[in-house]
Amino acid sequence: MATGTTPSTESADRPPARHGVHTPGRAAIPTRHLRTDRWWVPPLVTALGLGAFVVYSTWRAFANGDYYAAPYVSPFYSPCLAANCADMNGGADWHLFGSWWGLSPALIVLIFPLGFRLTCYYYRKAYYRGFWASPPACAVAEPHTTYTGETRFPLILQNIHRYFFYFAIPVAGILTYDVVLSFRDADGAWGHAGLGTLVMLVNIVLIWAYTFSCHSCRHIVGGRLKHFSKHPVRFRLWGWVGRLNAHHMLLAWVSLISVALADFYVYLVASGAFDDPRFF
């Protein structure tokens, strides 16, 4: 019985495959996989979900309109850093880019949360499987001829994930400030809240939960320590982040959905398609 990389005599008449895990020189396993479940469903659902978000976010990022309805601002457009931003009453409307910037201001700021999610460890797994079938699923043969992992360009750039995490913190802080401003009415008077306030509040809670559940955050908080007993505060923080990290996949999805819903809600109000109900 063959156990090495040499095909057995039983498969000698079978022409050798020339790609993926069936490349000559690797273990001679004739079947592509032995799974009997619908293993293709998760990567398919992942591809459809991420694809839908990419289409929606691309449309909204280039729309350059209907992103501010006092006191609400879309998370896609905050902070607004271009001179062509809509005037926001007390909001993060900072004209760091002058009149020479003629494109949507969302294209300036979205690079940071997009880069943070694009290089996220979970999202890498999700779109590697969903879009590239690399691999399609656990215990399913790799279909590609070669595999270099993240050791070559462009995937080696995934290693800058931690730096995007550093940028994600102030962006989330600004979105928190936007939530505070949502406790005003359209004229800027405090002590008011509407359905949009609740939408934005839920969104920022999920964004912070996803951000703090990040693997890089867990390493920053508790990594490079030889003795947790000498660092009780960091150990406690590491434990809290670890509990969030156990739900990182779920938080990645619900926060992705919530940020799209928050943007869509602001779009409906700003475009006049929906009147924001006021609670008080």
Image: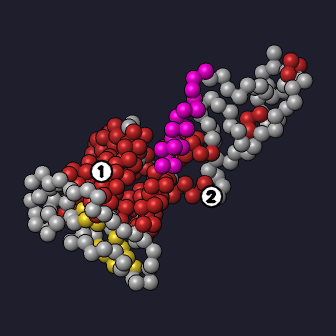
Label 1: how many Cα within 10 Å (few below 14, some 14–19, many 20+): many
Pointer 2 residue: 154
Residue toward you, 225 or 13? 13
State the extent of the magenta-drawn residues as a range: 36-52
* Residue 247 percent across, percent down from the top left: 38, 37
Side of 92 where 35 appears, left or right: right
Q: Residue at x 45, y 74 (%)?
A: 103
Is 212 located above or below residue 23 in the figure?
below
Residue that appears at 51% across and 49% down? 51
| Residue at image coords 49%, 55% | 55
Secondary structure of the residue carrying tag 1 is helix
Mark 1 highlights which residue?
A: 203
Could you tell whether 115 is left or right of 1 in the image?
Answer: left
Classify mark 2: residues with Cα within 10 Å, few (<14), some (14-19) or many (20+): few
Q: Which numbered disc, 1 or 2, marks the residue that appears first in the sequence?
A: 2
- The kind of residue tagged 2 is Pro
Secondary element at tag 2: loop
Find the distance from the CA under tag 1 to the CA under tag 2: 31 Å
Tell us which disc is closer to us: 1 or 2: 1
Is residue 253 something one can see in this rendering?
yes
Chief SS of the magenta region: helix
Count of numbered circles on the image: 2
**Residue 83 pos. (x, y %):** 36, 80
Q: Amino acid at mark 1?
A: Asn
Q: Of all residues shown, which one is farthest toward the top?
A: 1
Q: Is residue 250 magenta?
A: no
* Residue situated in front as seen by the camera: 143 or 151: 143
